[in-house]
């Protein structure tokens, strides 16, 4: 059985790909930080991925804490201009979160996650190519998570009755794998990260062709089960990488090129399975939608709406966290019927929320940083170059995904992506200098940051518990308090209180009596129930023009849940209910709760 020769070179031992595994603790922490969050199936409402994101944040902070105490003082590598620019961009993104009219409590988690991402990028650059660095443990952790997710995907498609919500998440629909993150496109990105990690680890560890071929076959087959069109593009990118990267062994490149025919063979096999068993394969529905002119669901319309908002707010944008509110309150007769809280395109999102100048500055800085980082792809040492190329491909995959959705708004994608980018930018600096070790002052601040972050995440877990118990009283220690008391206590949560506000606003028989509850929750996600309650609250306070405007926007969504609300117009006699009267077409600014209801947002 043939195997690939291990890449050898002067950096091989420093890169940690062979020799004594002095970074065994790094591997365990990587599995906790990057692997486990992708595999947690348990969901605690109201945020379905809260446990996954909390696990990622706590895991990466613990990794930084131990690395800062054990290894950071030995790092001799300066971060370099590319990595410094990357860190600066992430810190700027964290700072701009506070330049908004959205309630400040809802900006704590996004800004904190971006600061953590910046520190991870710095640490990744500082430890690039070192035996105590991050690249190898990160790749192994993501490969392990991807391989285990193949088992999850197979169960969700072929044996959904085995999904128990404890080890395997319940599938959200028949005939489609969604993984334990419960999102098929996110699963496909993880699987493609796994393909890249398998190429890197396989080449550098000298895997046999049979082993690498089997691993890639399993991962590509799982991408088929997601029926993700984003995943289909990613498989093509994997083959393209194999076609152009002449530094990879020829047999590896052949396996990568075979990914495309393997993907279509798997798709054909699923169609045959569906025809033979009568079970549904979601990929058939995806093909039909694509052939009927809907290649990306409702994205075309949300992109068109977003461009209109950018044209209306070109300089400062609508404010971070305010996209859903402004979009929902702006007349768009051709809007998509789903309730979007994101434009599903990263550059557009930057432009619409923070303004075109800021978006251009961020994208230009990132472009310059990655252009400088290309030096890592061409270093003479084969092991270092292979690792850098794997990281570059993984960044390209999540970058393409970010043009169609928003994976980087989830901590379990943002944090490993920032670490990858830092490692790549740091590797562009070349071999570590052989000077005397630096002082441990840098590690002391890192340990302090990580320790403070762990305390902060623990505090946020307590904040989340206060609202989770509203939706699941079984979480209470002992007998749960009455619902009204749980809602009142949940509203005291600084970070997640808007979920309690939602319960208060939508359950009130007379929403105008709880007008204060709309100040935060209206900025989170306006849906049918909340828009109806908001319109009734405005009407109950005599602000009929504003109420008619909200009702008109709700009508544009054509949601069946609002049918009874508008059916009153068919039988009502004069004077007509407010929702039946002409649209007042007010500016979105006039509908902000702190303006329309005359009360400041909490």
Image: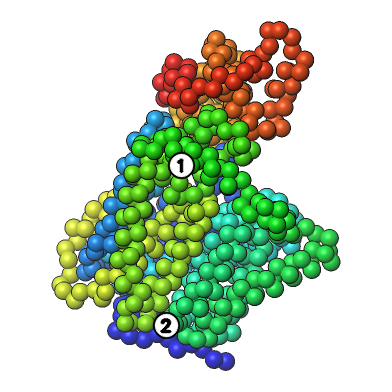
Of residue 79 and residue 565, the one placed in the foreground of this image is 565
Of residue 412 and residue 224, the one placed in the foreground of this image is 224
Q: Is residue 568 left or right of residue 466?
A: right
**What residue sits right under mark 1 in the picture?**
461
Identified at 61% across, 59% down, the residue is 229
Dot 2 alpha-carbon crowd within 10 angstroms: few under 14, some 14 to 19, many 20 or more? some
- Residue 388 shows in the view: yes
Q: Is residue 593 left or right of residue 297?
A: left
Identified at 65% across, 28% down, the residue is 555
Q: Position of residue 80 (x, y in %)?
A: 24, 64
Dot 1 alpha-carbon crowd within 10 angstroms: few under 14, some 14 to 19, many 20 or more? some
Task: Check the image and name the residue furthest to the bottom.
Answer: 1
The kind of secondary structure element at disc 2 is: loop
Identified at 31% across, 42% down, the residue is 95
**What residue sits right under mark 2 in the picture?**
247
Task: Check the image and name the residue furthest to the top.
Answer: 574
Q: Position of residue 348 (x, y in %)?
A: 45, 46
Picture quadrant where residue 59 is located: bottom left
Q: Is residue 507 left or right of residue 194?
A: right
Q: Which mark is first along the chain, 2 or 1?
A: 2
Relative to 485, is 133 above or below?
below
């Amino acid at each position: 059985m043939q195997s690939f020769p291990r890449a050898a070179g002067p950096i091989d031992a420093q890169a940690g790909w062979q020799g004594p595994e002095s970074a065994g603790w790094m591997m365990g922490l990587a599995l906790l930080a990057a692997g486990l969050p992708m595999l947690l199936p348990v969901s605690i409402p109201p945020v379905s991925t809260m446990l996954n994101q909390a696990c990622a944040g706590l895991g990466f902070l613990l990794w930084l804490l131990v690395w800062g105490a054990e290894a950071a003082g030995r790092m001799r590598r300066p971060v370099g201009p590319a990595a410094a620019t990357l860190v600066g961009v992430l810190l700027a993104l964290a700072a701009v979160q506070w330049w908004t009219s959205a309630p400040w409590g809802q900006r704590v988690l996004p800004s904190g996650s971006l600061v953590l991402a910046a520190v991870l990028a710095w640490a990744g650059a500082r430890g690039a190519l070192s035996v105590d660095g991050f690249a190898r443990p990160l790749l192994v952790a993501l490969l392990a998570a991807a391989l285990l997710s193949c088992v999850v995907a197979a169960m969700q498609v072929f044996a959904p009755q085995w999904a128990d919500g404890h080890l395997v998440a319940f599938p959200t629909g028949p005939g489609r794998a969604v993984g334990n993150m419960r999102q098929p496109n996110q699963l496909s990105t993880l699987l493609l990260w796994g393909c890249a990690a398998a190429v890197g680890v396989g080449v550098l560890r000298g895997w046999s062709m049979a082993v690498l071929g089997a691993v890639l076959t399993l991962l590509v087959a799982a991408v088929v089960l997601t029926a993700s069109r984003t995943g289909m593009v990613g498989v093509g990118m994997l083959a393209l990488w194999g076609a152009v990267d002449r530094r990879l062994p020829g047999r590896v490149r052949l396996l990568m090129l075979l990914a495309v025919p393997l993907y279509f063979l798997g798709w054909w096999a699923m169609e045959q399975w569906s025809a033979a068993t009568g079970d549904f394969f979601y990929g058939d529905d995806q093909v039909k939608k694509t052939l009927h002119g809907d290649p990306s669901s409702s994205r075309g319309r949300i992109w068109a709406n977003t461009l209109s908002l950018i044209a209306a707010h070109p300089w400062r944008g609508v404010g971070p966290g305010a996209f859903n509110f402004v979009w929902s309150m702006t007349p768009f007769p051709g809007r998509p019927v789903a309730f979007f809280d994101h434009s599903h395109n990263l550059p557009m999102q930057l432009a619409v929320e923070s303004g075109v100048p800021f978006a251009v500055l961020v994208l230009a800085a990132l472009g310059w940083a990655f252009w400088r980082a290309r030096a890592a792809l061409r270093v003479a040492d084969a092991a270092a170059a292979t690792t850098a190329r794997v990281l570059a491909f993984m960044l390209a995959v999540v970058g393409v995904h970010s043009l169609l959705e928003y994976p980087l708004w989830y901590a379990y994608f943002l944090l490993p992506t920032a670490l990858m980018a830092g490692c790549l930018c740091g590797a562009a600096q070349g071999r570590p200098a052989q000077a005397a070790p630096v002082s441990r002052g840098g590690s002391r601040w890192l340990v302090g940051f990580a320790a403070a972050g762990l305390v902060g995440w623990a505090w946020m877990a307590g904040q989340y518990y206060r609202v989770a118990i509203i939706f699941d009283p079984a979480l209470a220690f002992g007998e749960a308090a009455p619902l009204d008391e749980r809602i009142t206590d949940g509203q005291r949560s600084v970070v997640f209180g808007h979920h309690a506000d939602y319960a208060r606003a939508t359950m009130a028989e007379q929403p105008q009596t709880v007008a204060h509850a709309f100040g935060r929750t209206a900025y989170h996600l306006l849906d049918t129930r909340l828009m109806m309650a908001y319109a009734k609250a405005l009407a109950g306070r005599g602000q009929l023009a504003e109420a008619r405007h909200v009702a008109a926007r709700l009508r544009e969504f054509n949601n069946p849940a609002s049918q009874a609300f508008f059916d009153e117009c068919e039988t009502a006699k004069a004077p007509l209910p407010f929702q039946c009267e002409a649209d007042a077409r007010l500016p979105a600014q006039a509908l902000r709760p702190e303006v329309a209801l005359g009360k400041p947002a909490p």
